[in-house]
Structures are given as C-alpha cells and as structure tokens.
Image (cartoon, helix red, strand yellow):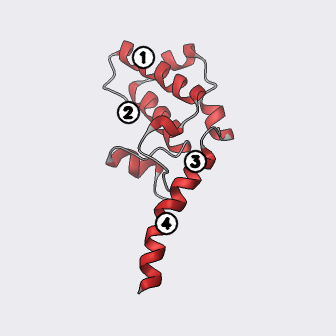
Amino acid sequence: MIQFAVCRRLVPIALLLTGLCLAGFTSPEQQRNISRPAHELEQMTCSQLWYLGEKIRADGGVCPRDDRSRQAFFRNRTCVSQDERVLVGEVKAYLAALRRIAADKGCPDLP
C-alpha cells in the first residue's frame, strides 16, 4: 500500500521532468507542420486550421482543452502540460500566425 502511494506521487514528477527535458525540442512531425507557408494557411478552411493548430499543440505535448481535441489526438499519447510555454519559441510564433490567419478568415477562436 505504501509503495503504491509513493508511485502515485512519483508519476506526476516524472511527467514534469519529461516535459522539462522535451522543452526546447521540436519533433520532425512538428517541424514539418510548422513549415507550411502563410499562403498555404490562407487557403485552408477553418476546420483545417483548427486541426493543424491542435496537431502542432499535441505534437508538442500540450494537453487538449476540449473533447474534440482529446478524441482527435490523445487516444494513444499523453500530454505534458496544459500550458503552451512548453513549446519552443518557433512553434509558439507559428501558432500565433495561424491564429491571426484564422481570425482574419472569421474562424471561431482556435486554441
């Protein structure tokens, strides 16, 4: 019983340390997704922009904010943090640009 309680306390610490180790890391999949030029993003539908934004967040370990995101991206993976601060600056800047394009198109708020 004591062993289980200790393990339960260590799991969140291990996840936090994993997140700290991954901070500053961009996966190949994430790099591929953030390399889409602005003109390509401008041609996407609101749903496509949402999907791309959520995919980039999920690949970076950011926890989903809603059931739609959870069902689309987190069936077989875990998240590190609900805060986008775990993402590298390049990824955060790309998400900001993606959100601006979505806003210009009149899309509902992207996460």
Q: Neighbour class for label 2 at 10 Å: few (<14), some, many (≥20)? A: few
User: Residue 64 at what x, y percent from top left?
Assistant: 40, 46
Task: Tell me the amino acid under the disc marked 1.
Answer: Arg
Q: CA distance from mark 1 to mark 4?
A: 37 Å
Q: Earlier in the sequence, mark 3 or mark 4?
A: 4
Which of discs 1 and 4 lies nearer the camera? The answer is 4
Q: Find residue 100 and name its label.
A: 1
For label 2, the residue is 111
Per the image, the residue denoted by label 3 is: 20
Q: Earlier in the sequence, mark 4 or mark 2?
A: 4
Mark 3 vs 4: CB contact within 8 A: no
The disc, 1 or 4, on the residue closer to the chain's N-terminal end is 4
Image quadrant in which you'd find residue 47: top left
Disc 3 or 1, which lies upstream in sequence? 3
From the top left corner, tell me how far across and down residue 11 is, in percent: 49, 66
User: Distance of mark 3 from mark 4, alpha carbons?
Assistant: 14 Å
The reply to whether discs 4 and 2 touch (Cβ–Cβ < 8 Å) is: no
Q: Which mark is in front, 3 or 2?
A: 3
Q: Secondary structure at mark 2?
A: loop
Residue 109 is situated, as x and y percent measured from the top left of the image, at 32, 26
User: Residue placed at 46% from the left, 76% from the top?
Assistant: 6
Task: Pinpoint residue 34: horizontal percent, then vertical percent.
Answer: 60, 28
Under mark 2, the amino acid is Pro
Circle 4 residue: 11
Instruction: Label 1, secondary structure: give it.
Output: helix
Residue at (47, 44) in percent of width and height: 62
First of labels 2, 1 by sequence position: 1
Residue at image position (40%, 52%) is 71
| Residue visible at 41% across and 87% down in the picture | 1
Question: What is the C-alpha distance between the residues marked 2 and 1?
Answer: 12 Å
